[in-house]
Amino acid sequence: MPKRDADLVVIVVLFVLSGLFSLVSPLLVNLASSRLNLNTSFTPFSIIILVLSGLLSLVTAFGLWNFQKWGWFLGVGILLIGIGRSLINGSFLAIIIPALMLIYLFQKRQKFLQKSKI
């Protein structure tokens, strides 16, 4: 198994944090809105999207940590979707970190695209 660079550790941690935030955010918003008597909550559809997004980010982190080909493809896909969404929303500063992560994944793609064990 190839050696894990510090850069890869950072990318995996960012995917884990993103996944956890996506899983926890509907609960926190609903809890805060009920305690503060705010009329803010997520729709059932948005909760499903956030939970699926969170789980996908955690699965991606697992795949990247274990140098799996599918983890690389999921990571690239998630980052491209995020960059595209930021471009559509006009959030150009929000592109910087995903773009750097994407550049790293492409530079190290041979580590991931070797024959997977799973």
Image: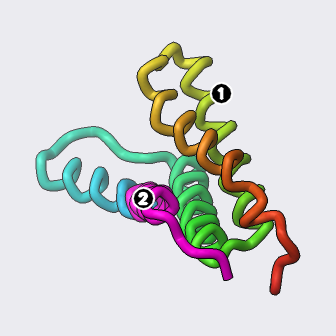
Q: Callout 1, which amino acid?
A: Gly
Q: Nearer the viewer, residue 18 or 22?
A: 18
Q: Residue at x 43, y 62 (%)?
A: 6
- The residue beneath circle 1 is 84
Q: Quadrant of residue 59?
A: bottom right
| Residue at the extreme right of the image, as rendered | 115
Q: Nearer the viewer, residue 89 or 96?
A: 96
- In the image: residue 33, left or right of residue 25: left
When the figure is inspected, residue 82 is found, relative to residue 74, above or below; the finding is above
Q: Quadrant of residue 38?
A: top left
Q: Residue at x 51, y 14 (%)?
A: 90
Lower sequence index among marks 1 and 2: 2
How would you rate the neighbour count of disc 2 (Cα within 10 Å): few for under 14, some for 14-19, many for 20 or more?
few
Residue mark closest to the camera, 1 vs 2: 2
Residue 10's disc is 2
Q: Secondary structure at mark 1?
A: helix
Q: Residue at x 48, y 17 (%)?
A: 92
The residue range painted magenta reads 1-21
Q: Residue at x 42, y 21 (%)?
A: 93
Residue 30 point in image, percent of width and height: 30, 54
Q: Callout 2, which amino acid?
A: Val
User: Does the magenta-highlighted stretch encompass residue 113?
Assistant: no
Residue 106 point in image, percent of width and height: 71, 46
Distance from Cα at disc 1 to Cα at disc 2? 22 Å
State yes or no: discs 1 and 2 in contact (Cβ < 8 Å). Answer: no
| Residue at the extreme bottom of the image, as rendered | 117
Q: Secondary structure at mark 2?
A: helix
